[in-house]
Image: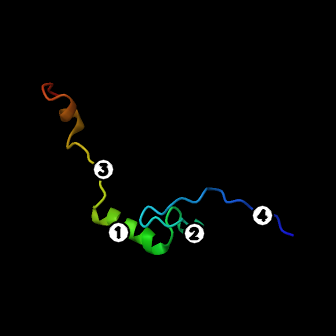
Amino acid sequence: MPAKVEPLRKTRPCPECGKPSHREHYPFCCNRCREADLSRWLTGAYAIPVADDETKADYPDEES
């Protein structure tokens, strides 16, 4: 009888639809959900806000 192998990670819900994730598409449940998330990143729907020039944002009175 073969030994039962435990998964490396616990299954988590898919961030797109909430179904349990699968190893092949982790952390997503399927390729459709993975590609939907990638599409949002590529079209700019997800973005990390940044200041135009961080040195000016932190020290507006100081000249370089």
- Kind of residue at disc 3: Ile
The single residue placed furthest to the right in the displayed view is: 1
Crowd tier of the residue under label 2, counting other residues whose Cα lies within 10 Å: few below 14, some 14–19, many 20 or above = few
Residue located at (87% from left, 70% from top): 1
- Kind of residue at disc 4: Lys
For residue 48, the mark is 3
Check disc 3 and report its element: helix, strand or loop. Answer: loop
- Kind of residue at disc 1: Ser
Crowd tier of the residue under label 1, counting other residues whose Cα lies within 10 Å: few below 14, some 14–19, many 20 or above = few
Check disc 2 and report the residue beneath it.
24
Q: Tell which tag, 4 or 3, sits nearer the viewer.
A: 4
Check disc 1 and report the residue beneath it.
39
Relative horizontal placement of residue 1, taking residue 38 as reference (left or right): right
Check disc 4 and report the residue beneath it.
4
Residue located at (21% from left, 31% from top): 58
- Kind of residue at disc 2: Glu
